[in-house]
Image (spheres, rainbow, N blue to C red):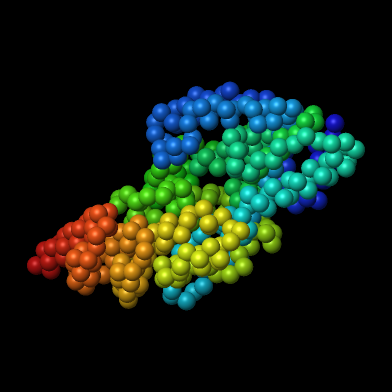
């Protein structure tokens, strides 16, 4: 047995500044919620999240049969002092959690350190399972039941003093630890996060329609971004922080300087969009080696940049889109560049779009070009009526 206070002291030594404990008992109360989310299509596109997986995740001992306690851990990462350069260059935004090293590796390394400290403290081996968003367990439910934080209306865990700017992980261990009590939710009548979501992904308190979420679209979604969502995505190229930034608790979060979660160069937080569209796959892998951005894949990252440039670029940025439309090897990127060119170029883009259509052989890209031409023609017709 180890006291909770001593556990927190050891966790702090290991770089885990937020810690709470719950039992390894199942979470049966979550089944109706998960079942309904799947039935309602709120998780469509994530084919791996099946009812079978959901059922499995409700019982922590499916992962660690000898588990008695779950140590819920958190590492804050809010660094408000880092802002985009004021240079007039169109830039993408990367979610703050992905600015530094890949949190999966960082948290696991720190939990392994805590595990070693626990074994040293207890004078015996401790059977443990380390989980960082990579195994079938309900991370946020563990954090809520342990009292690490409470569910915000944007479905994220809000941690006292740090808001939702906290990386979550779990250690299932074979030692009994007195559990912490859950916290009382403190969102009250506030619905700032719901109102802030540009795509309407937060369909109600505590309910997310994942396929409309910018984080899902820019990271998990591998295919074509729906036309109606593209103008709503702003300049996000990996993830999204909008609902977190709107939350009063996260606005008031303590600043944290953790070297592992700080960017080393501007491309890790506010990359130039034209740079993203021109880099090779090899350069993409080199710049983002050891970082979560690699999850988006080279083509997905460039696709996101094309949409972002269509949303926030300048007319003279049409040149890079013309270049992408003519030369990029991936049809997914060429197709979204056609849409972006129509947004930026207006009537001036018509010759380029027609020329690309005459040369393009890929059926998907041709469909995007036809849509872009139609949008441009409609804008011209609308403008002509206004002038009259």
Residue 276 lies, in percent from the top left, at 45, 67
In percent of width and height, residue 76 lies at 66, 52
Q: Position of residue 164 (x, y in %)?
A: 59, 47
From the viewer's perspective, tell me whether residue 378 is left or right of residue 84.
left
Q: Is residue 186 visible?
A: no
Residue under the point 35% across and 51% down? 225
**Residue ranking furthest to the left:** 388
Q: Is residue 313 above or below residue 190?
A: below
- The quarter of the picture where residue 380 lies is bottom left
Residue 144 horizontal side relative to residue 314, left or right: right
Residue 4 vs residue 224: left or right? right
Q: Quadrant of residue 312?
A: bottom left
Residue 40 appears left or right of 385:
right
Outermost residue to the right? 123
Q: Is residue 163 above or below residue 286?
A: above
| Quarter of the image that includes the N terminus | top right
Q: How many marks?
A: 0
Between residues 2 and 185, which one lies in front from this camera angle?
2
Of residue 203 and residue 329, the one placed in the foreground of this image is 329
Q: Is residue 341 visible?
A: yes
Residue positioned 57% across, 28% down in the render: 56
Q: Residue at x 45, y 44 (%)?
A: 194
Which of these two is toward me, 150 or 132? 132
Farthest residue, direction front: 361
Q: In percent of the image, x 24 and y 60: which residue is there?
A: 361
Where residue 115 appears, as percent x and y from the top left, is: 79, 42
Q: Quadrant of the C terminus?
A: bottom left
Quick check: 38 above or below 264?
above
């Amino acid at each position: 047995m180890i006291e909770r206070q001593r556990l927190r002291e050891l966790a702090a030594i290991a770089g885990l500044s937020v810690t709470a404990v719950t039992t390894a008992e199942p979470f049966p109360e979550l089944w109706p919620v998960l079942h309904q989310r799947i039935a309602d299509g709120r998780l469509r596109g994530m084919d791996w999240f099946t009812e079978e997986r959901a059922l499995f995740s409700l019982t922590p001992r499916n992962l660690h049969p000898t588990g008695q306690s779950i140590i819920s851990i958190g590492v804050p990462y809010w660094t408000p002092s880092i802002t985009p350069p004021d240079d007039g260059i169109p830039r993408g935004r990367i979610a703050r959690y992905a600015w530094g090293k890949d949190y999966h590796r960082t948290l696991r390394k720190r939990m392994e350190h805590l595990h070693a400290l626990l074994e040293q403290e207890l004078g015996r081996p401790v059977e443990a399972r380390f989980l960082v968003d990579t195994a079938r367990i309900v991370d946020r439910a563990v954090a809520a039941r342990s009292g690490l934080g409470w569910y915000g209306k944007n479905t994220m865990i809000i941690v006292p003093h740090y808001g939702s700017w906290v990386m979550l992980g779990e250690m299932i261990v074979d030692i009994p630890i007195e559990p912490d009590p859950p916290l009382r939710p403190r969102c009250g009548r506030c619905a700032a996060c719901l109102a802030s979501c540009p795509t309407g992904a937060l369909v109600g308190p505590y309910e997310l329609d994942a396929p409309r979420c910018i984080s899902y679209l820019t990271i998990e979604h591998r295919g074509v971004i729906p036309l109606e969502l593209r103008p709503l995505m702003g300049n996000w190229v990996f993830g999204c922080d909008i609902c977190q930034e709107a939350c009063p608790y996260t606005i008031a979060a303590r600043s944290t300087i953790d070297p592992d979660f700080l960017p080393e160069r501007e491309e890790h937080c506010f990359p130039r969009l034209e740079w993203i569209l021109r880099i090779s796959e090899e350069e993409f892998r080199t710049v983002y080696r050891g970082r979560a951005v690699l999850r988006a894949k080279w083509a997905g990252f460039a696709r996101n940049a094309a949409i972002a440039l269509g949303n926030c670029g300048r007319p003279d940025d049409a040149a890079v889109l013309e270049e992408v439309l003519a030369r990029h090897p991936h049809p997914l990127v060429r197709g979204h560049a056609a849409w972006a060119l129509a947004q930026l170029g207006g009537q001036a883009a018509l010759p380029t779009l027609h020329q690309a259509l005459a040369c393009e052989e890929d059926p998907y890209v041709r469909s995007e070009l036809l849509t872009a031409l139609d949008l441009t023609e409609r804008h011209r017709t609308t403008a002509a009526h206004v002038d009259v």
